[in-house]
Amino acid sequence: MSHIIVVGSLNMDLVVRAPHLPIPGETVLGNDFQTIPGGKGANQAVGAARLGANVTMIGCVGNDDFGKSLRANLQKEGVDTTHILTIPDSPTGIAAITLDEDGQNCIVVASGANMKLTPEDVEKAFSQIEKVDVVILQLEIPLDCVEAAARLGQERGAKIVLNPAPARQLSDILLSQTDVLVPNESETSLLTDLPVDTPSQAETAAQALFDKGVGSVILTLGSRGALVLDGNSPATQLSPHQVDVIDTTAAGDAFVAGLSVGLGEGMSLVEAAKLGNATGALAVTKLGAQPAMPTQEEVSSLCNSLEFQ
Ligand code: RIB
């Protein structure tokens, strides 16, 4: 069983389904409203736990109902919440999510307590965690915490998986400590200033990211699958799975979870990325972030069905 530390965000997602996403200045009448556990870090933690990994999460919530509910949900999923701090004077992070009829979304995050995590908190937590194979990071917490976690993980010999979401400029040192960088299309464009509309553009952009000093790059391309580049061999294109899309929220988080579990179990980068690709595909077939993370059985069943085609 792989041991995974996720250092990242916990948000309560405030989700409204609407006929279409509003344009600036437009009011749209939505259908229904739901609060659903989310946050990129917590989604990735649940995703990895459902695939059988031993997962510890480091992060912060506020001392409020959303915080209690997010912690309880992680515990129910088997994630170790010992190192999730409760911050007295900050609200738990929330994400306002509008979802259209095609399952596409737009998201605004109010980070709240997520931004109260400190590098000292991360160091203290790492010192109390015995085993770590993979450290999963995203960018919804202070950047110095991401940098501390990458350094500490590397010192412990763990693989560092960085999902640069939401995108921002990253230091050379953080990039050099990253074993696998996993951006989506918009994050890739923002980080490279390059388009990713065609397969050859995606490969050029992946190469530009690789040249920044990361160990390898996996671009998640939504309905176009994913592109894996390890610098030693030509890029590998992973085809998308054909699924009925209900909600694309957290598809990338599911991909990162599957990839990380695969890496923790010693799979090659491409095999682990295939596990991520299947996990991400299944996540879009259900509503919400954490509730949509597929189980080990569901992912195995999708992968096995492909082997017989
Ligand atoms: O990646 C999806 C997540 O982004 C949502 O759950 C939301 O909380 C935001 O963090």
Image (cartoon, helix red, strand yellow):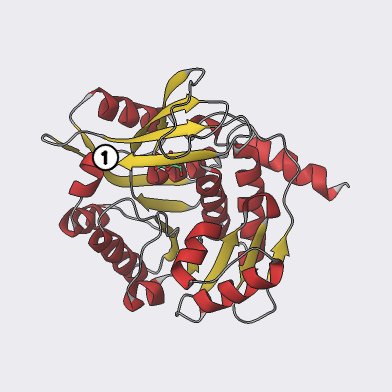
Classify 114 as above or below 120: above
Q: Is residue 279 left or right of residue 118?
A: right
Across and down, in percent, residue 200 comes to 69, 72
Assess disc 1: are there few (<14), some (14-19) or many (≥20) residues with their C-alpha within 10 Å of its C-alpha.
few
Across and down, in percent, residue 287 comes to 56, 28
Front residue of 265/105: it is: 105
Q: For the residue marked with disc 1, what is the amino acid?
A: Thr
The residue at 65%/43% (across/down) is 281
Across and down, in percent, residue 158 comes to 41, 65
Front residue of 188/87: it is: 188
Would you identify the image quadrant in which residue 132 lies?
A: bottom left
Classify 301 as above or below 191: above
* Element carrying mark 1: loop
Q: Is residue 241 left or right of residue 259?
A: right
Q: What residue is disc 1 on?
A: 82
Q: Quadrant of ligand 1?
A: top left
Classify 255 as above or below 87: below
Q: Is residue 116 left or right of residue 135?
A: left
The residue at 70%/78% (across/down) is 234
Q: Residue furthest front?
A: 25
Residue 184 seen in render = no
